């Protein structure tokens, strides 16, 4: 039985063989969601990507995304 193409561990296990298919699927999903949102009146798409994830930055740049702003998390100091 072949692995489910949407099963994340499969993509990690066969990264070299599946990277092209994974990128095509990812692109298709992002563009499909953007079209779906545009048909419902959305004018902008935003993604939240870790600063250190350079591969994601490059992939999204190829789809036309550009950095908009940075974010960081704030946490209350531990008590005690």
Image (cartoon, helix red, strand yellow):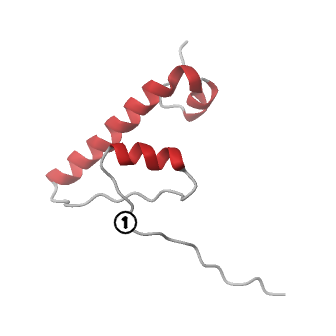
Q: Residue at x 45, y 25 (%)?
A: 20
Extreme residue toward the right, this view: 80
Q: Tell me residue 53's x, y (percent).
A: 55, 51
Q: On the rendered structure, is 23 left or right of 79? A: left
Answer few, some or many: residues within 10 Å of disc 1's Cα (few below 14, many 20 plus, some between 14 and 19).
few
Nearer to us in this view, 66 or 24: 66
Q: What residue would you read off at disc 1?
A: 68
Q: Tell me residue 57's x, y (percent).
A: 45, 50
Q: Is residue 73 above or below residue 10?
A: below
Element at badge 1? loop
- Quadrant (top left, top right, bottom left, bottom right) of the C terminus: bottom right
Circle count: 1
Q: Tell me residue 47's x, y (percent).
A: 40, 57
- Quadrant (top left, top right, bottom left, bottom right) of the N terminus: top right
Q: Is residue 78 above or below residue 38?
A: below
Extreme residue toward the top, this view: 1
Q: Residue at x 37, y 48 (%)?
A: 61
Extreme residue toward the bottom, this view: 80
Q: Residue at x 38, y 30 (%)?
A: 24
Nearer to us in this view, 55 or 75: 55
Q: Tell me residue 79's x, y (percent).
A: 79, 87
Q: On the rendered structure, is 16 left or right of 25? A: right
Q: Residue at x 26, y 49 (%)?
A: 34
Q: Quadrant of residue 28?
A: top left
Q: Is residue 80 above or below residue 53?
A: below
Nearer to us in this view, 3 or 35: 35
Q: Is residue 66 above or below residue 7?
A: below
């Amino acid at each position: 039985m072949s692995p489910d193409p949407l099963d994340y561990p499969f993509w990690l296990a066969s990264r070299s063989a599946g990277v092209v298919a994974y990128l095509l699927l990812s692109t298709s999903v992002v563009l499909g969601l953007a079209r779906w949102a545009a048909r419902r009146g959305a004018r902008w798409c935003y993604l939240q990507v870790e600063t250190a994830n350079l591969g994601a930055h490059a992939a999204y740049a190829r789809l036309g995304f550009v950095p908009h702003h940075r974010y960081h998390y704030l946490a209350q100091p531990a008590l005690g």
